[in-house]
Amino acid sequence: MDKLIVEGGHKLSGSINISGSKNASLPILAAALLTDEPVRISRVPDVSDTNYMLQILSQLGASVERSSGTVRIESPEGISSSASYEQVRKMRASICLLGPMMARMKRCTLPLPGGCVIGDRPVDLHVRAIQALGARVRVKGGNLVIDAPNGLVGTTVDMRGDSGPTVLGTDNLMMAAVLAEGTTVIESAAREPEVVDLANFLNKMGARIEGAGSRTITIHGVERLHGCEHTVIPDRIEAGTFMVAAAMVSDGLTLNRVWRPHMKAISDLLVECGHTVEFNEEGTTVYVAPAKNPRSGKILTNPYPGYPTDMQAQMTALFALTPGISVVKDTIFPQRFMHCSELKRMGANIKVDNGTAIITGVESLSGAPVMASDLRASAALVLAALAAEGTTEIHRLYHIDRGYEMLDEKLMSLGAKVSRVLDLDAVPLEES
Ligand code: EPZ
């Protein structure tokens, strides 16, 4: 297991390319199961979550080839409809295999994803969706055992849960519906750009999907889908993470291969707090520089186009060094504050209560040994370490490797003093 050693206080400068989106790639890779023809997907980030997904697909019998960021997948007749616990337990997002497996094979056995540090990860909305299309769902031995002997039939499904829309739930229903009989209408659909990217990929395969990006998506079932080529959208959360790094500890950074329309909530908040955010005309490059007098801020996370839950930890690191009192409330994952206790070990002044963090800015943070806990919490610790005085050791780096492609190399290219070393005193790897 690795740890990251970060020598704080070195201002970043220069430019980097943002990678393709992890959260767009995962359902798109799963959607390759919907055809027996080859699909070619470019800008798939080389992170452990996409590697887990590719391992699962090849375990199911698909042929998977990867050359740098491009993946070629072919899912011949006879692929398995049952994914192993060993693989699935590593990544909750493997639930997005449910839709394509049911559409292609009309049955699937998928281990139930357990909870994780950001909170319980229920799948009741996924189950509601596939049952609405006529499938039978049983829970047996920790697995979802699903079949649809009479096939899947389109209908209208309202996918709203207590915490609002579901991203992967919307994806699963869309993928199950593309080969169903008749028309499916998804009400209260998730509007995330990653859902739109999946719909665009499915339409390139010959699906007939309208309204992706709005709260109502209509899918007209077709007989079969064919192969296609697709390039995944930029990762708006990676881009946001580097924008916060620029606002915290840089002389100004330029981020290439971003897409402005996906970054509004993140950009608006940084500007409200006094930081400089300038996109080029095409919206594909952004320059970010720290405010001379940064202002505290308030975050209430919401489904897209609201402020993303995946970006609240990173902004908390910035707020920790911003004069005044900032407030972060996560309405989607109210327990997603594991980073706060680690930031306090570095001298941050944060009170967490009932899904809300109250952050009082301090003059400086001091480097310390800290523990990564989940993907975005770990990113927040890296940001704090870059700005802190002294050296920080971030243990359990595998959390970061799940969703950030070559993070240490990118930071080094911007002038950060970071090094990845083997963590000799690491405790055994518990379930991620
Ligand atoms: C996706 O997870 C993202 N992951 C998450 O990013 C992101 O935090 C989340 O959407 C919210 O934006 C991927 O896209 C791979 P949800 P997903 O279903 O789809 C509740 C990261 O850091 N819910 O939209 O699993 C759920 O508990 C990851 O990259 C139900 O109640 O999340 C939550 O409160 C972390 N029942 C809310 O809905 C269900 O059946 C939104 O969850 C499903 C979800």
Image (tube, helix red, strand yellow):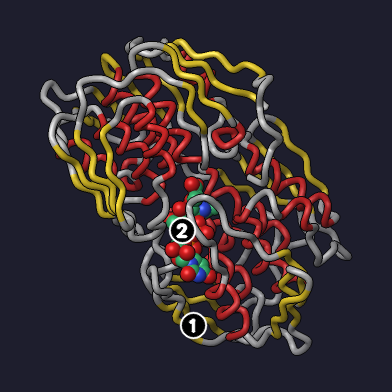
Is 216 on the left or on the right of 430, as rendered? left
Which residue is the site of mark 2?
196
Residue visible at 73% across and 85% down in the picture: 151
Is 43 on the left or on the right of 7, as rendered? right
Q: Position of residue 104 (x, y in %)?
A: 74, 70
- The answer to whether 264 is drawn above or below residue 131 in the figure is above
The kind of residue tagged 2 is Val
Q: Which of the numbered marks, if any, corresponds to residue 157?
A: 1
Closer-to-camera residue (426/104):
426
Between the residue at mark 1 and the residue at mark 2, the CA separation in whole angstroms equals 18 Å
| Comparing labels 1 and 2, the label whose residue is closer to the camera | 1
- The answer to whether 161 is drawn above or below residue 261 in the figure is below
Figure quadrant of residue 416: top left
Closer-to-camera residue (301/335):
335
The kind of residue tagged 1 is Val
Regarding mark 1 in the picture, which secondary structure is present there?
Answer: strand
Residue visible at 65% across and 52% down in the picture: 29
Residue 261 visible in the snapshot: yes
Figure quadrant of residue 43: top right
- The answer to whether 18 is drawn above or below residue 214 in the figure is above
* Figure quadrant of the C terminus: top right
Q: Position of residue 63 (x, y in %)?
A: 82, 48
Residue 194 visible in the snapshot: no
Q: Position of residue 431 (x, y in %)?
A: 67, 46
Is 164 on the left or on the right of 226, as rendered? left
Residue visible at 17% across and 36% down in the picture: 271
Q: Residues within 10 Å of mark 1 (few under 14, many from 20)?
A: many
Q: Position of residue 411 (x, y in %)?
A: 46, 19
* Figure quadrant of the N terminus: top right
Regarding mark 2 in the picture, which secondary structure is present there?
Answer: helix
